Amino acid sequence: GNSVTQMEGPVTLSEEAFLTINCTYTATGYPSLFWYVQYPGEGLQLLLKATKADDKGSNKGFEATYRKETTSFHLEKGSVQVSDSAVYFCALSFNDMRFGAGTRLTVKP
Amino acid sequence: GAVVSQHPSWVICKSGTSVKIECRSLDFQATTMFWYRQFPKQSLMLMATSNEGSKATYEQGVEKDKFLINHASLTLSTLTVTSAHPEDSSFYICSATNPQGPIIYNEQFFGPGTRLTVL
């Protein structure tokens, strides 16, 4: 079945550091891929998405490229801020939506 | 656009009582809504898929008699946790798809979640 494997956390970075959170997927068809962010006590917010191979999703300095050849959708940001501290979920959607385990990011000043 | 709300945002109840959680699509009609639960520091687990006017489809291992789902209108789905017990304490999140949006995106729009604590 469809599934998502996400880099285990937690991840702790200093402000302005480079961020990468790895995400790989397994799917029988051609899913859409998403990154969601969850702040403490809140629901999920869509961060970015990509719907086909080689698409690059971007938002708020975050980027992720849909790589069909490596079945990956790694999240990157060049310079993180304290306000980026949250839990990040990679997800794929085909007939339904499947989530990765989530990666908790803490950014220290 | 594509805003989903949930009510209540948090609820505390006694063991053995029933709790109803509402999920509303505010600016679109949602033929399909989804219910997830999330335990602390864990990912979202799909509980059931709710289609307007028909019975919900439950994921394996989810008790349909315990988690009653009603999707009576195109903008409202409800989840009732019957005879709640402490192990039902969790964060419940609903989502909806917008059939008038780009279907190829398969995108779901999420509500803010409801935290249930059963004493």
Image (cartoon, coloured by chain):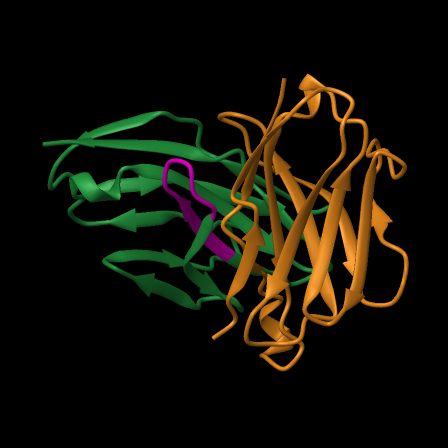
Chain for colour orange: B
x, y percent for residue B99: 67, 77
User: Is residue B93 visible from the viewing direction of this image?
Assistant: yes
Q: Is residue A29 above or below residue B81?
A: below
State which region is magenta. Answer: A34-43
User: Is residue A96 visible from the viewing direction of this image?
Assistant: no
Pick whichever, A86 or A18, lies toward us. A86
Pick whichever, A37 or A67, lies toward us. A37
Which residue is drawn at the image coordinates 82% and 34% (left, top)?
B62
Q: Is residue A60 above or below residue A79?
A: below
Q: Colour of chain A?
A: green
Residue B71 position by quadrant:
bottom right
Pick whichever, A28 or B11, lies toward us. B11
Number of numbered discs overlaid on the protein picture: 0
Which residue is drawn at the image coordinates 74% and 46% (left, top)?
B79
Magenta stretch containing residue A41, yes or no? yes
x, y percent for residue A98: 63, 47
Which residue is drawn at the image coordinates 85% and 51% (left, top)?
B57
